[in-house]
Amino acid sequence: MSLPLEGLSAIVTGAGRGLGRAEALELGRLGAAVVVNDYGPPGRDESVAGSVAESVADEIRAAGGRAVAHLGDIADFRTARALVDLAVREYGKLDILVNNAGILRDRMVFSMSEDEWDAVIRVHLKGHFNTTRFAAAHWRERAKAAADGRVYGRIVNTSSEAFLAGSAGQPNYAAAKGGIVGLTTSTAHALAKYGVTANVICPRARTRMTEDVFAGFAEAEPGGFDALSPEHVAPLVGYLSSPAAAVVNGQLLVVHGGMVAVVERPRVAAKFDASLSKGPTFSFEELDGVLTPYFGARPRGETFAAGEVLGLRRG
């Protein structure tokens, strides 16, 4: 019996630890040949040997799969090109791109430095764009040579509930993650005709990057079920990367242990038209007369903390 991703190749960025590691291992378990990307650090001789990326590649190979490691900053345009080129050189083609790499530089908006803003936007948003740009070009060129103009391509991007509900100390992170959603839906429209899908997940997982974010949330007893383990996110990434998900495109999904939620695009909650005004448009006074009562009647606290939007509570 063949595995779901047998014969396919994948890139996972930020795969040395945490979510990316769990995702790379899952894709390898499902049969994909994986390029394990991580920024570093390199081994003692400054090579891939001994790096965290090589360690994950070793795990995949030890389980009978195929994997190579790649060290580099995907927020660098040339590095992203080299990463895609490596997958094509090693495996003959690229089929799956999982963008996971990210950093945090948390601070309130009134205290944030320019460097803290730029660093997070660069790694998350520009990093997602860079790899997507070269993967998309690869698929487009292959599609031109295909009889039906279509190829197999899957993109799984990583956003966050910080984008959905706001996160007071993460204006840079929330903005970057919102931008990734826009990038994903635009990419989904642009590449659909080539047979490529692009989807985005908002994972909840306790990792080195999020340990402060989830401080105070209930942790599992030793040997118990931990809903925030990265391993519970990885199966959805495997599914979205598979042929089974051919009809899933341009979607946003929140995922953690025991739950997958499909998030709708924003919908109009209320509408006030010119029938409520004296002229063809509203005056200041008329807006005050309709909007102030509307918002005033909404329950206080209707906007929750990011972790509370879909039921997660501090322990």
Image: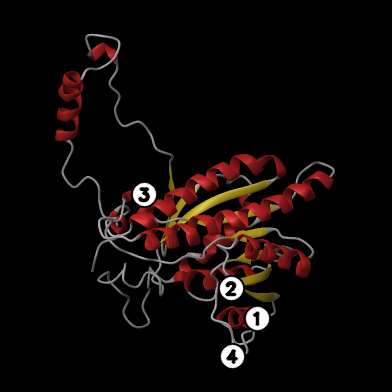
- The kind of residue on which mark 3 rests is Leu
Whether residues under marks 1 and 2 lie with C-beta atoms below 8 angstroms apart, the answer is yes
Q: Position of residue 250 (x, y in %)?
A: 54, 44
Q: Looking at the image, is mark 1 or mark 4 nearer the viewer? A: 4
Residue 257 in percent (x, y) is at: 41, 65
Image quadrant containing the N terminus:
bottom right
Which one is closest to the eye, mark 4 or mark 3? 4
Q: CA distance from mark 4 to mark 3?
A: 41 Å
Q: Tell me the SS state at disc 4.
A: loop
Q: Earlier in the sequence, mark 1 or mark 2?
A: 2
Q: Earlier in the sequence, mark 4 or mark 3?
A: 4
The quarter holding residue 226 reads bottom left
Instruction: Give the mark, 1 or 4, whose residue is nearer the N terminus.
Output: 4
Residue 144, picture quadrant: top right
For residue 281, above or below residue 254 = above
Front label number (1 vs 3): 3
Q: Residue at x 79, y 50 (%)?
A: 142
Report the residue marked by disc 1: 63
Whichever of callouts 2 and 4 sits on the residue coming sooner in the sequence is 2
Mark 2 packing: few (<14 Cα in 10 Å), some, or many (20+)? Answer: many
The CA span between labels 1 and 4 is 26 Å
